[in-house]
């Protein structure tokens, strides 16, 4: 079986999305829905290795997803404006770097995380740039031979996510990785 760059991009995107979703559904991740700061810290302190592992998996999943989608964007760049390829990848890379900084902070200072004392700008940067970059990838997919519904899935879901984020001022980042999982599968299975 020949693995084209588009199929490789799909595999990497799927691997990243699944890795992120695994982290999101680890038992330690119940900390994110816990309202009490003391209880959050208690959950983290009961499983510090799992807490650190989850942060690593969140970061690895996000990074792999970006690498896969960047490969796809550059593979499909002849069908879209070149600037859109660079903008989409730049948004995703900057968003993921901000996310990595946030993950590092919550791994090394879980007490600040639990009481809501970490700087908010890295998370807000991630919350704005990542869905924006994913929507731009959706536009690239719409201009390619990939089925249109895959592009519309990214554009539509990310637009909705941006609106919900603006209204709620928060959103669980796992919502980005369902659509990217589907997009990765489409890239892998698609035959140009």
Image: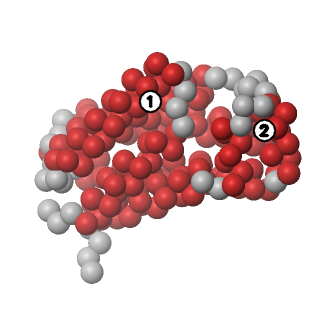
Q: Nearer the viewer, mark 1 or mark 2?
A: 2
- Quadrant for residue 103, please give it: top right
- Quadrant for residue 146, please give it: bottom left
- Quadrant for residue 79, please give it: top left
At 82% from the left and 54% from the top, the residue drawn is: 47
Which quadrant of the figure contains the N terminus?
A: bottom left
At 44% from the left and 42% from the top, the residue drawn is: 176
Query: Residue tagged by mark 1?
Result: 129
- Element assignment for label 2: helix
Between 162 and 66, which is closer to the camera in this rendering?
Answer: 162
Which quadrant of the figure contains the C terminus?
A: bottom left
Which disc, if any, is residue 178? none
Query: Residue tagged by mark 2?
Result: 40
Relative to 35, is 152 above or below? below
Closer to the chain start, of discs 1 and 2, is 2
At 49% from the left and 59% from the top, the residue drawn is: 18
* Percent coordinates x, y for residue 135 in the rendering: 31, 35
Dot 2 surroundings within 10 Å: few (below 14), some, or many (20 or more)? Answer: many
* Percent coordinates x, y for residue 111 in the rendering: 83, 34
Report the Cα–Cα distance between label 1 and label 2: 27 Å
Report the residue that reaches farthest toward the top.
167
């Amino acid at each position: 079986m020949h693995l084209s760059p588009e199929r490789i991009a799909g595999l990497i995107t799927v691997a990243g999305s699944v890795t992120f979703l695994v982290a999101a559904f680890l038992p330690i991740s119940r900390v994110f829905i816990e309202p009490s700061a003391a209880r959050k810290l208690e959950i983290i302190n009961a499983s510090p290795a799992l807490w650190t592992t989850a942060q690593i998996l969140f970061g690895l999943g996000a990074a792999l997803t970006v690498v896969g989608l960047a490969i796809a964007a550059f593979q499909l760049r002849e069908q879209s404006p070149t600037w859109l390829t660079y903008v989409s990848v730049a948004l995703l890379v900057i968003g993921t770097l901000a996310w990595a900084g946030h993950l590092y902070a919550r791994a090394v200072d879980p007490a600040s995380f639990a009481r809501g004392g970490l700087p908010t700008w890295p998370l807000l940067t991630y919350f704005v740039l990542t869905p924006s970059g994913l929507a731009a990838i959706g536009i690239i997919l719409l201009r390619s031979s990939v089925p249109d519904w895959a592009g519309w899935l990214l554009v539509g879901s990310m637009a909705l996510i941006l609106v919900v984020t603006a209204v709620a001022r928060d959103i669980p980042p796992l919502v980005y990785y369902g659509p990217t999982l589907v997009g990765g599968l489409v890239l892998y299975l698609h035959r140009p």
